[in-house]
Amino acid sequence: MKDRSESKVPEKSANPTSPWPLPGASDLLDYWVDAWQRSILLLDVLRQRGNNCVEHNAREAPNVLSFDAELVRDGRSLPRPVNYGLVRIIPPKGTSIDPSKRPFIVFDPRAGHGPGIGGMKHDSEIGVALVAGHPCYFVGFLPDPVPGQTIEDVCEAEARFVEEVAARHPGAEGKPCLIGNCQAGWQIMMMSAVHPERVGPIMLAGSPLSYWAGVHGKNPMRYLGGLLAGTWLTSLAGDLGHGIFDGANLVANFESLHPDNTYWKKIYNVYSKVDTEPPRFLEFEKWWGSPVLLNAEEMQAIADQLFVGNKLSSGELYSSNGLRVDLRNIKSPIIVFCSWGDDITPPQQALDWILDLYDHEDEIVRAGQTIVYCLHQSIGHLGIFVSGKVATKEHGEFAQSMDMIDLMPPGLYEAVITGIDENVENPELVQGSYLFSLETRTLDDIRKLGGNSPEDDRAFATAARVSEITQGVYSALMRPTIRAMVTETSAELTRRSHPNRLRFEMFADENPLMRPVADWAGSVRGNRRTASPDNPFLAFERMASDMIASGLEMWGKARDAATEAFFFNTYGSPILQAMVGLRADKTSVSPRIGRDVAREAAAKQAAIHLEQRIDQGGLIEAAVRALIYVRLPEGKVDERGFAALKQISTELPAAKRVGLAGFKVIVKEQYLIPLLDSERAIVALSKLLPEDHRQCEEALALVRRVLAARGVLPEEGARRLKRVEAMFAGPPPKVGRDKAA
């Protein structure tokens, strides 16, 4: 008889590395431990974020600058005091500053958040300007406004700051370069329109100037004023704040654009990468979670005059002394940096002010304005002035090429930044890793980017009229009661209980429930067990996260589509338009800047002056005119030609050098003269040349050297160069002709 133990079927052995007999149980345990530990660590990250914000907001002058700075001018000490200040950025150790280079001033946006975003990283607008050798300054602000300060007061303070910086650098080649991010961009444009003589090149990064502009299916923020029936809610918020508008409301508007990121993706990104992501997250959230305050009058003016009224580019804004804020007054180069990925300031809002001011690019030339724009393909709004990659590429190239831009003659250009490869000739003349070029453009190139139809403009104009009505009704019926009920204490309580503050502070150590979290997190870090990257439950988590994010994104898009449909169905109604006084027989309601008789008279005088200057000048004027004549058909310049000019300048004796300001005047004049009469301008070259043929040969050699910097000339350019060479060579000797006779 057989032993039963011998006939028994042997059991399958479990995975020797797993204490669990079921398939996948080990993966489940690993994932469960990892997920639980990540939850504790995420909670600790939120605790640190709350503590950071409490500590940051308790400072007298909170900012997120990563550079040391010293105060130069406190705006509170000005005759019209404001809560702004000017500081000098102290160059980091090892950074060399060239005192002959123009200073840079970075203006930070006061659009709900605190200051410092333009210099939060070393790879930033401030950082690249310092690397390029420029003295650098920063204009920031305090969290609380000075009682009674206005937008005009801030503009006047900024004009004083620019004047102060220029006075500190009397030997610099060129006036200060101003960089305005977002809200700061339109503010320095207003200041520069009133004080054009004080400023150098102006760079606008993600700055809206044409507030109605956009395209259907995108840019939902432009409908917000119509969705709320005007700006009366802005007035209500200011009255509930006892004369103070809480910037947290603006932050909430920005966050509402992308509910998928606000309510899920941002936090999940930290949760899923909790071992590596917290430093970057905490650095950014310190800025994002520190809203500042504005006077109610400031915010009301911004909402009424700009975002709903769209009065900046139409010349409908006036200073307190009756001076019109006319952007055509600005004669310094204006550089506009915008992105297709920016839904807060889309390219249309950043660029369509040009279409509001001018009907043709020739008008830009006659106005003496140089406008350069650069389009990024994907970066978002904050990335325009926060991204390290954007800083080291676009901002770095602009910093290195600002003098070249300042020398450009009037017109409309697009900045094109490309990598360097073996096809680039004379790469030794290129600074850095990119080639910076400027290509001429027309207003049709901007129109091709998309924009409003006349019907769209009529709908926005209707919304602006409705806003005036509802604002009047609120002021007459509701405001007295609201103001009588609100106290400073209730206003402060309202601000403290704002969701955009509570969600930070409730996780800080001030909350007794959060105090054990630090110890829990310390214990977790000491016993951290991460799940394997190929853990199937981790893959399921990511799939669930993607589904949640996609659902929120779809909801946001559906909301935006409904908002757009509501806006145009409501404000596009002919009945409503008639009720608010918009006549159906008017072909256009888009605000257009009016004629300026003094400006037109000045333009005529300038044309007469140029006519007289066609055959006047010397060898420098002749060489510049020749360069422009040869290269003009291409409609393109790049940094190599400018680098060759700088090399030539350093080789010349000091007595023969022309400063940047003087050379800029020559370039502008010699560019405009051929536009009056191209043939007469080139024929008159011989009158500008000296009789000394040796000097003419030397000048021609320099012209060839600059032209050769970009490589071989195209066919038309080569033909024009031959004509120039013949004129510089002069007429044949008379002796030969006499002998022939």
Image (cartoon, rainbow, N blue to C red):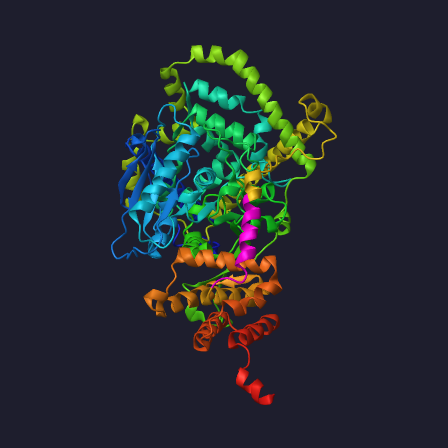
**Residue 284, position as x, y percentages in the image:** 38, 42
Q: Nearer the viewer, residue 150 or 126?
A: 150
**Residue 82, position as x, y percentages in the image:** 35, 30
Corner quadrant of residue 599:
top right
The relative height of residue 608 versus residue 57 in the rendered view (above or below) is below
Q: Nearer the viewer, residue 114 or 273?
A: 114
Left or right: 277 as drawn, with respect to 384: left
Residue occupying the far bottom of the picture: 739
For the C terminus, which image quadrant? Answer: bottom right
Q: Nearer the viewer, residue 109 or 175?
A: 175
Residue occupying the far right of the picture: 585
The residues colored magenta run 602-617
Q: Residue at x 45, y 37 (%)?
A: 194
Q: Is residue 611 magenta?
A: yes
**Residue 430, position as x, y percentages in the image:** 43, 66
**Residue 622, position as x, y percentages in the image:** 49, 66
Corner quadrant of residue 354:
top right
Q: Residue at x 54, y 67 (%)?
A: 685
- Res 543 seen here: yes
Q: Is residue 182 magenta?
A: no
The relative height of residue 208 versus residue 686 in the rendered view (above or below) is above
- Res 21 seen here: no
Q: Residue at x 38, y 46 (%)?
A: 277
